[in-house]
């Protein structure tokens, strides 16, 4: 399990999605929010219209029933 997790973290570090800092025997990881945001932006834009429409329909349905 730990070996698998280490491999995943190495991939995330290589993509600059996380950074690591060692303190003694421990290694702490931090998400690079800016890189994550930039990476997800095209995907989020693609689905934004769908989500907005779906949430509006959900709101309208809840207002009609409540």
Image (cartoon, rainbow, N blue to C red):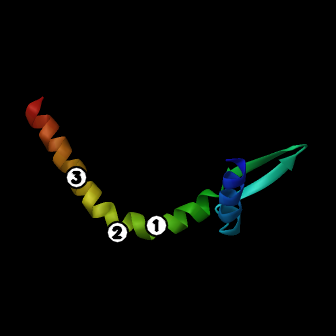
Horizontal placement of 58 versus 30: left or right? left
Q: CA distance from mark 1 to mark 2?
A: 9 Å
Read off the residue under disc 2. 46
Could you tell which of marks 1 and 2 lies nearer the N-terminus?
Answer: 1
Residue beneath the point at 19% across and 44% down: 58
**Distance of mark 3 from mark 1, alpha carbons?**
19 Å
Could you tell me which secondary element the residue under label 2 belongs to?
Answer: helix
- Whether the residues at callouts 1 and 2 have beta carbons within 8 Å, the answer is no
Q: Mark 1 and mark 3 in contact (Cβ < 8 Å)? A: no
Q: What is the secondary structure assignment of the residue under circle 1?
A: helix
Q: Position of residue 19 (x, y in %)?
A: 73, 58
Please name the residue that numbered disc 1 is placed on.
Answer: 41
Q: Position of residue 2 (x, y in %)?
A: 71, 48
The quarter in which the C terminus is drawn is: top left
Callout 2 crowding tier (Cα within 10 Å): few <14, some 14–19, many ≥20:
few
Question: What numbered label is drawn on residue 54?
Answer: 3
The furthest residue to the right: 24
């Amino acid at each position: 399990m730990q070996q698998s997790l280490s491999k995943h973290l190495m991939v995330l570090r290589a993509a600059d999605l996380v950074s690591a800092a060692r303190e003694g025997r421990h290694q702490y990881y931090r998400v690079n929010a800016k890189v994550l945001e930039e990476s997800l932006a095209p995907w989020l834009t693609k689905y934004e219209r769908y989500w907005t429409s779906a949430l509006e329909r959900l709101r309208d349905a809840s207002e009609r029933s409540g």
